[in-house]
Amino acid sequence: MLSTDIHLASEKLRSGEVVAFPTETVYGLGADATNESAIAKIYRTKGRPGNNPLIIHTDCVDSVARYVTLRERSRVMGQFLRLQHLWPGPLTIVFPDKHDSICDLATSGLTSVGVRVPNHPIARELLAATDLPIAAPSANRSTYVSATTAQHVSDCFGQDLFILDGGQTSVGLESTIVKIEENGPAQLLRAGLIRQEELSEALGELVELGPKLGGAPGREKDCAMLSPGQFRKHYSPKTPVRLFNDRGSLASFIEQNSKQSTGLLLFSKETAIHGKNSVLRTLSESGDHHECAQNLYAALRELDNRQLDLICIERPKNGPLYEALIDRIERAAEK
Ligand code: AMP
Ligand code: MG
């Protein structure tokens, strides 16, 4: 059920129910992170594997100390202070040590915990009114494309779920995730609107790439456990997806396979591609990466609903969101 009643949504969260709400990145499926049975409902609803930890959301930076252990003059405390100005915003920080009040199920049994202060008026009002740490993974079935409108959420979960409707999300891709540790470098676990360079600059030291993003192979084993969100298949439509390196190879594929019904997802207008059996979607006329990110999931869902044989996506051009976009598209194409 779609609603704009933030007060009612807050009451539902406080009584252990699951509620979907908008953030600036994608819609989240929220529940009280201190309540194990509420958190179990999130995993059940999404069909999410139990080893994939949830991100905790709160309305203000000062509340973070209620949910994670921050020792005076520790490295983690220092790094947190340096990253703070990026909140509220599309950044998740994984801290090494959660408070006991956050139930173990919310972090898949890890002692570390991911926290974010989202920058969306509805999310912030909801979180402030609820005054609880709210675990909220993306509001889609596990491995499917994330939701950027309330309707997308409803398409996944039907009428029974309470959904706060905040229109289309502005960023359109999941938050950047950075992990900070007492010993060892900060690591980028998921690319997003806030870039590696920006994080390195804020921290005054180089942020390493996590394994899926091309980081040190030696640490792969740790990270596969610590960040199962790096599952290869993710953000993925039911229709097979194929990634093309450039528009020329995409055009000749369409020409040679004209009997197949295909969805063509392009990042800019430039030269057009035509196919008898093709549906063309351009994410941004000018190729603007922010616009592409905002429109990507809606376009993937729309093409996925058309019973096509294949969705063809071209590789995005270099630009500010290249890492974030290519990460999502490569995983969408994963079989
Ligand atoms: P989603 O909620 O679907 O956006 O996915 C959240 C992702 O955050 C997870 O899949 C993990 O990759 C990451 N994450 C959350 N908590 C932790 C944690 N404690 N340690 C490492 N990664 C985490
Ligand atoms: Mg997700």
Image (cartoon, rainbow, N blue to C red):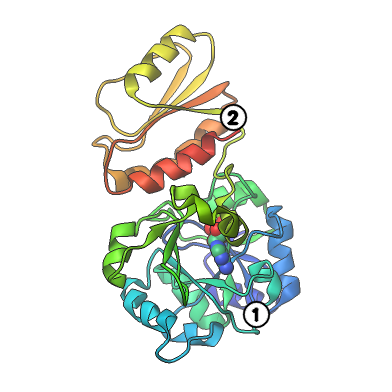
Q: Is residue 290 above or below residue 196?
A: above
Inter-mark Cα distance, 1 to 2: 38 Å
Q: Could you tell me which secondary element the residue under label 1 belongs to?
A: helix
**Residue 286 position in % (x across, y down):** 23, 36
Residue 4 - label: none
Question: Which residue has dot 2 on it?
Answer: 239
**Residue 295 position in % (x across, y down):** 40, 43
Residue drawn at 65 percent across, 74 percent down: 12
Mark nearer the N terminus (1 vs 2): 1
**Residue 110 position in % (x across, y down):** 64, 70
Question: Which residue has dot 1 on it?
Answer: 14
Q: Residues within 10 Å of mark 2 (few under 14, many from 20)?
A: many
Left or right: residue 94 compared with residue 318: right
Quarter of the picture containing the C terminus is: top right
**Residue 333 position in % (x across, y down):** 53, 34
Q: In this view of the protein, can residue 301 be seen by the observer? A: no
The quadrant of the rendered image in which ligand 1 is seen is bottom right
| Disc 1: residue Cβ within 8 A of ligand 1's nearest atom | no
Nearest to the observer: residue 187 or residue 277: 187
Left or right: residue 310 compared with residue 213: right
Amino acid type of the residue tagged 1 in the rendering: Arg
Amino acid type of the residue tagged 2 in the rendering: Thr
Residue drawn at 35 percent across, 56 percent down: 193
Q: Is residue 318 above or below residue 274?
A: below
Residue drawn at 43 percent across, 79 percent down: 76
Residue drawn at 52 percent across, 58 percent down: 27
Q: Residues within 10 Å of mark 1 (few under 14, many from 20)?
A: some
